[in-house]
Every structure is written in structure tokens, then in C-alpha cells.
Image (cartoon, rainbow, N blue to C red):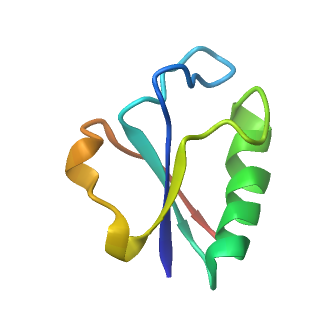
Amino acid sequence: MKYYFTFGQAHYTTDGYPMMNNWVTVIANDYGEARELFIEKFTSLYMENPDKFAFQYEEKDFESEYFPKGEFMLITS
């Protein structure tokens, strides 16, 4: 299943890139595994702390038109 993680206005990578209007896609078996992969392979490496994101969406609830910069990264298990 695909899960999408989005960011708010004050979310920047550790090198200063603004994550607002981007998302990170995670392909995982379930909601919990998706969050674990996201933290392990993205926020732990690129954000100032592992809880630095706004929302986690399931594929059926995600509307990409609200995030015009597009996908920043694809993570798979």
C-alpha cells in the first residue's frame, strides 16, 4: 500500500530546503510500518527530528493537487 507524508510551512530539511508543498511516498504493508520506514529512511536522516512532518495519508485520502512541488522521495521496504 502507498502512504503519503506531508509537511507544513515551518518544515525544512537540515540543509535548509523548504518541504512545504512536497510529499514523501512510502510503500509499506500497513500504516505503522509506513511511519517506521519514513522515520528511518527520511526524517532521521534529513530533518532536525524524527517527528518533523505534518500528516500521514493513506492513498485513498491523499490529494496531490494540494502539494504542487510534488513527490520529494519514494521509500520502499
Q: Camera-side residue: 5 or 14?
A: 5
Q: Camera-side residue: 35 or 73?
A: 35
For image coordinates 30% across by 36% down, the residue present is 69
- Is 17 placed above or below 28 here? above
Q: Is residue 58 left or right of residue 29?
A: left
Residue 33 location in percent, x, y? 72, 74
Residue 8 location in percent, x, y? 48, 30
Which residue is situated farthest in the left direction here? 65
Which residue is situated farthest in the top direction here? 16
Residue 17 location in percent, x, y? 52, 20
- Is 12 placed above or below 7 here? above
Q: Is residue 63 left or right of residue 33?
A: left
Residue 68 location in percent, x, y? 24, 38
For image coordinates 70% across by 31% down, the residue present is 47
- Is 29 placed above or below 55 here? below
Q: Is residue 49 left or right of residue 77?
A: right
Quarter the C terminus occupies: bottom right
Q: Camera-side residue: 5 or 69?
A: 5
- Is residue 10 in view? yes
Q: Is residue 63 left or right of residue 5?
A: left
- Is 17 placed above or below 7 here? above
For image coordinates 79% across by 54% down, the residue present is 40
- Is residue 77 in view? no
For image coordinates 58% across by 22% down, the residue present is 12
